[in-house]
Amino acid sequence: DTGVSQDPRHKITKRGQNVTFRCDPISEHNRLYWYRQTLGQGPEFLTYFQNEAQLEKSRLLSDRFSAERPKGSFSTLEIQRTEQGDSAMYLCASSLGQSNTEAFFGQGTRLTVV
Amino acid sequence: AQSVAQPEDQVNVAEGNPLTVKCTYSVSGNPYLFWYVQYPNRGLQFLLKYITGDNLVKGSYGFEAEFNKSQTSFHLKKPSALVSDSALYFCAVRVPSGSARQLTFGSGTQLTVLP
């Protein structure tokens, strides 16, 4: 499968714990995006990488959130001290380096904070 | 700031009838426009995009969309709906220049095709 893959698909955690998600983009894509989607809403932008550089961060990305893409390939999104409001679907997408190209999305990681 | 509005949360249509899912946008400058579809517990799947040129763009599964610059709209259409088209549809916009590289999505429209 050469699409965007995310791991894990589901994560249940207790409030206050830290969680980390992984995204493997399509191999030739140099842009990588993280989005958050809650029930009944469209995806909301969190952050964006071009190669290993994190070029944009949304105001939604509080200090408890951190994302990395250390070698310009896979990316991780970590949430520290999780809160119930963090419960959502976390989507990763990748694209080629031109703005006119579509982004391809992974199936997402569904986080439930109890 | 860029934004997208999908004025209908829910659209119901009978199988075999034409369908339209509405989208309007607000950006500074010329937009790149996209439609995605989402099936339950799945990621988003790309349907089609408008970049430049012909205002009518064709995409996957028989879908098409019409770009209307004066009305700032990009409505999704299909001449004959299938039950399998039932899903959540998202319109998205991106500006081709400037610092913002992300897609901005609408809130989605749930399409139900009735047999």
Image: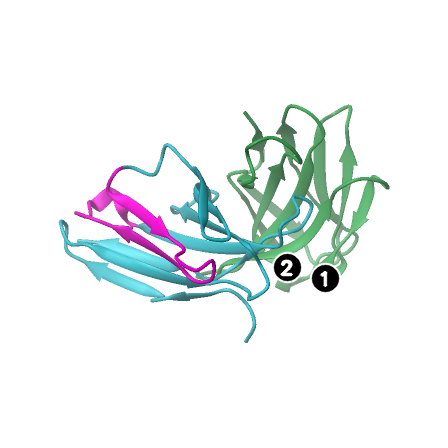
Chain colours: A cyan, B green
**Helix, strand, or loop for circle 2?**
helix
Q: Residue at x 74, y 25 (%)?
A: B71
Q: Residue at x 69, y 33 (%)?
A: B31
Which residue position holds label 1? B61
| Tags 1 and 2 both on a single chain | yes
Classify residue B20 as left or right of residue A84: right
Residue A76, percent from left and from top: 35, 57
Q: Residues within 10 Å of mark 2 (few under 14, many from 20)?
A: some
Which residue position holds label 2? B85
Residue A24, percent from left and from top: 45, 65
**Which chain is home to disc 2?**
B
Name the mark nearer the viewer: 1 or 2.
1
**Which chain is home to disc 1?**
B
Is residue A20 visible in the rendered image? The answer is yes
Is residue B19 visible in the rendered image? The answer is no
Looking at the image, tell me whether mark 1 or mark 2 is earlier in sequence order.
1
Q: Give the magenta-colored segment's residue range.
A: A63-87
Position of B115 relative to B4 (above/below): below
Query: Residue B44 falls in which quadrant of the image?
Result: bottom right
Q: Which residue type carries mark 2?
A: Asp
Position of B95 relative to A78 (above/below): above
- Name, please, the residue furthest toward the right: B54
In magenta stretch: residue A79: yes
Q: Are marks 1 and 2 in contact (CB under 8 Å)?
A: yes
Q: Which residue type carries mark 1?
A: Tyr
Residue B90, percent from left and from top: 57, 45
Position of A4 relative to A31 (above/below): below
Q: Residues within 10 Å of mark 1 (few under 14, many from 20)?
A: few
Give the alpha-carbon distance from disc 1 to disc 2, as whole Å.
9 Å
Q: Residue at x 71, y 57 (%)?
A: B81
In magenta stretch: residue A50: no
